[in-house]
Amino acid sequence: MQVNFLEIVASFMVLFAIIDIFGSIPIILGIKSKIGNIYAVRTTLVAFGIMLLFLFIGEPLLGIFGVDISSFAIAGSFILFLMGMEMVMGIELFKNETGSSGAIVPIAFPLIAGAGSITSLLSLKAEYETINILIALTVNVIIVYLVLRLTTFFEKILGVNGLHILRKFFGIILLAIAVKLFISNTGIHIGDTPTP
C-alpha cells in the first residue's frame, strides 16, 4: 500500500460530491425538528462504520444476502424518494422517533452512507489504493461530523422562512436524485421508444 496525494484528493472530491453534506443541511434540520436532537457523534460513527464495511467487504457482504449493488441502490432510492415527498408536500411519512436511534435512519443511512457513496467506494477501490480511499473517507467523515454538530448554527442563520424555502427546493432535488438512482440501476432509459 502506498499513500498517494493525488489519489487522496481525487477520492475525497468524489466522495464529497456524492455525500453532499452541505446540500443535505435542510433535510437534516427537518429531521431535527421532528426528533428534537441529532446525536452527531453516534450518527457519524454509524455512517462511517457502514462505509468502512462496504469499503473492505462490500460486494461479498451483499452477496451473502443474495443482493447486488443495483438492488441495494434501488432500495435506497425509495427511501430518498419518500424523504423528498415529505419535504415538498409537507406531509409525514416517517414515524417520529425520539431517542438516540432517531437520526440513524435516515441520516446515517441512506443520507450519508447511502447507495451513492457505497457504490462510489466500490468503484474507487477498483482504481485506487485502499489506504488513499480510507484517508479521503476519514476527512469527509470529519466534515460530516462538523456539519451535524453545527445544525443549530445553520438553523439560526437561515431562519424559519429560509428553512421553509430550502426544504421545498432540496425536496425537489432529493426527488430528482431518487429518480435518477432508480433509473440508472433498473436499466430504464428515458426517451426510448418502446418496441411493439
Image: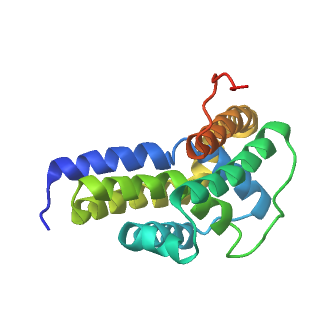
Q: In this rendering, is residue 38 above or below 157?
A: below
Q: Is residue 114 left or right of residue 120?
A: right
Q: In this rendering, is residue 96 above or below 190?
A: below
From the top left corner, tell me how far across and down residue 33 is, in percent: 76, 55
State how the image is colored.
rainbow
From the top left corner, tell me how far across and down residue 76 is, in percent: 63, 55
Is residue 22 in sight in this rendering?
A: yes
The outermost residue toward the right is 91
The residue positioned 60% from the left and 62% from the top of the image is 109
**Which quarter of the picture shows residue 70?**
bottom right
Q: In this rendering, is residue 114 above or below 45?
A: above
From the top left corner, tell me how far across and down residue 27 is, in percent: 66, 47
Is residue 53 in sight in this rendering?
A: no
The residue positioned 61% from the left and 45% from the top of the image is 186
Q: What quarter of the picture does the C terminus occupy?
A: top right
Q: Is residue 114 left or right of residue 57?
A: right
The residue positioned 35% from the left and 59% from the top of the image is 137
Count of numbered tags: 0
Q: What quarter of the picture does the N terminus occupy?
A: bottom left
From the top left corner, tell me how far across and down residue 180 is, in percent: 60, 38
**Which quarter of the picture shows residue 140?**
bottom left
Q: Nearer the viewer, residue 54 or 164?
A: 54
The residue positioned 75% from the left and 63% from the top of the image is 36
Q: Nearer the viewer, residue 49 or 81?
A: 81
Q: Nearer the viewer, residue 78 or 97?
A: 78
Q: Is residue 42 left or right of residue 57?
A: right
Q: Is residue 156 left or right of residue 121?
A: right
